[in-house]
């Protein structure tokens, strides 16, 4: 981590510590937009994925954005900051302009994508977009659509959700219906295969970063509580059974962190679908173990609304299934391994040049 990233980490930690109070988190869960938090974060320059040193002509390094996204998970910041940074990256790569303010991305849930068409009136899009994070609060959405058998990237704005939903952490997840919705020319990019892959995979990477931030926080809470809680005349941290469970939890957090950081390092230099899927699968698995052990150690106290543990664990249980669940990522990895073949698997993982060559060959075969 660079000196700038260290400074950014400290800045984000101080900012979120001051702003992400229990009252602010409860207010957001009750449906109120956290305007004070967003305004402060925006004023600090943390809501932009563009490099200020180039006047917005290039993106900030992915490692720098990862520092911010990880802090969002650690402090359970109730706003679409990870989604905004991701949408800005995707729009920038596709050459699509985007407004200031909060943005979001539409996850690809396996259904039929919206259909894009071109007529004398211009671009039109029809279909449904489901479970958009913070859909009711954002200025624009990055959406993958289908156009003449190919995929295209679209910027949707000026829409009202047809259904207001939420995840287990009470974060908005809203649905939109698109009926002959007119799009401006600068809101559409066709033949953008690489950015489209990035939308789903970088979404998985963002969620993995948020989860390792949240798991690190939950681990710290659990260790602290086990040292403070006294039973049978001594702290429960002194009992071997508790020690074993906390050690298991720490091992899973460490493994998930290592997998996510490895995927981040690769994604900063080339396409990293395989590494990101592996990281998301490993992190989602660790999230389940982390939540189970944390609540077991905290006992009944950890299940109360008054305790802050659930602010992180409910987010973990929600994020683990977004942008690819553990099972979905494992299935994708299985298909990839089957196509690569056992003879090339180790070289595929360890040799970037062969990795890229095999990936290019697979893309050609699918075209």
Image (cartoon, rainbow, N blue to C red):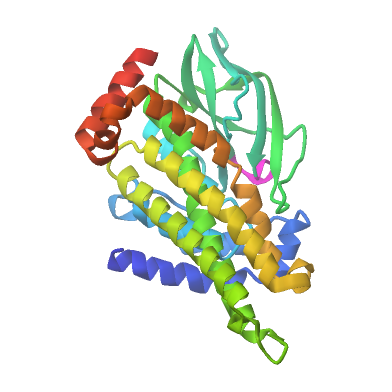
Residue 138 magenta: yes
Residue 134 image point, x, y percent: 65, 45
Q: Residue furthest bottom?
A: 233
- Is residue 100 in view from this perspective? no
| Residue nearest the viewer, comparing 303 with 2 | 303
Residue 27 magenta: no
**Residue range corresponding to the magenta coloring:** 134-139
Q: Is 257 rendered above or below residue 10? A: above
Residue drawn at 48 percent across, 56 percent down: 69
Q: Quadrant of residue 324?
A: top right
Residue drawn at 61 percent across, 74 percent down: 242
Q: Residue furthest front?
A: 240
Residue drawn at 39 percent across, 19 percent down: 191
Q: Is 137 rendered above or below residue 158? A: below
| Residue nearest the viewer, comparing 165 with 42 | 165
Position of residue 205 in the picture relative to residue 133 (left or right): left
Position of residue 161 in the picture relative to residue 199 (left or right): right
Residue drawn at 72 percent across, 50 percent down: 168
Query: Split into 4 quadrants, where in the image is the N terminus?
Result: bottom left
Q: Quadrant of residue 297?
A: bottom right
| Residue nearest the viewer, comparing 201 with 193 | 201
Query: Split into 4 quadrants, where in the image is the C terminus?
Result: top left
Residue 244 image point, x, y percent: 56, 70
Position of residue 61 in the picture relative to residue 85 (left or right): left
Q: Is 173 rendered above or below residue 209? A: above
| Residue nearest the viewer, comparing 204 with 278 | 278
Residue 218 image point, x, y percent: 59, 67
- Is residue 12 in view from this perspective? yes
Residue 26 image point, x, y percent: 74, 64
């Amino acid at each position: 981590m660079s000196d700038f990233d260290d400074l950014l980490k400290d800045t984000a930690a101080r900012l979120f510590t001051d702003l992400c109070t229990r009252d602010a988190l409860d207010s957001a869960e009750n449906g109120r937009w956290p305007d004070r938090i967003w305004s402060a974060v925006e004023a600090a320059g943390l809501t932009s994925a563009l490099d200020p040193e180039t006047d917005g002509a290039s993106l900030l390094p992915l490692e720098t954005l990862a520092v911010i996204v990880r802090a969002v998970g650690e402090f359970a910041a109730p706003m679409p900051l990870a989604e905004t940074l991701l949408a800005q990256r995707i729009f920038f790569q596709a050459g699509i302009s985007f407004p200031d303010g909060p943005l979001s991305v539409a996850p690809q849930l396996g259904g039929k994508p919206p259909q894009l068409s071109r007529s004398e009136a211009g671009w039109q899009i029809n279909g449904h977009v489901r479970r958009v994070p913070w859909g009711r609060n954002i200025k624009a959405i990055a959406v993958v659509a289908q156009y003449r058998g190919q995929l295209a990237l679209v910027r949707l704005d000026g829409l009202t959700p047809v259904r207001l939903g939420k995840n287990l952490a009470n974060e908005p997840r809203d649905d939109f219906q698109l009926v002959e919705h007119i799009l401006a020319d600068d809101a559409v990019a066709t033949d953008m295969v690489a950015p489209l892959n990035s939308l789903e995979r970088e979404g998985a990477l963002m969620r993995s970063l948020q989860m390792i931030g949240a798991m690190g926080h939950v681990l710290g809470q659990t260790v602290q509580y086990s040292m403070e809680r006294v039973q049978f005349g001594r702290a429960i941290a002194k009992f071997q059974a508790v020690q074993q469970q906390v050690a298991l939890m720490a091992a899973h957090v460490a493994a998930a962190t290592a997998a996510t950081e490895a995927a981040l390092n690769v994604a900063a230099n080339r396409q990293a679908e395989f590494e990101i899927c592996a990281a998301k699968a490993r992190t989602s698995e660790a999230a389940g173990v982390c939540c189970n052990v944390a609540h077991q150690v905290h006992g009944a106290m950890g299940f109360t609304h008054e305790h802050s543990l659930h602010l992180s664990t409910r987010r973990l249980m929600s994020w683990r299934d977004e942008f690819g669940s553990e099972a979905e990522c494992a299935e994708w990895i299985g298909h990839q391994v089957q196509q690569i073949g056992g003879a090339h698997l180790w070289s595929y993982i360890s040799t970037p040049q062969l990795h890229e060559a095999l990936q290019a060959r697979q893309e050609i075969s699918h075209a």
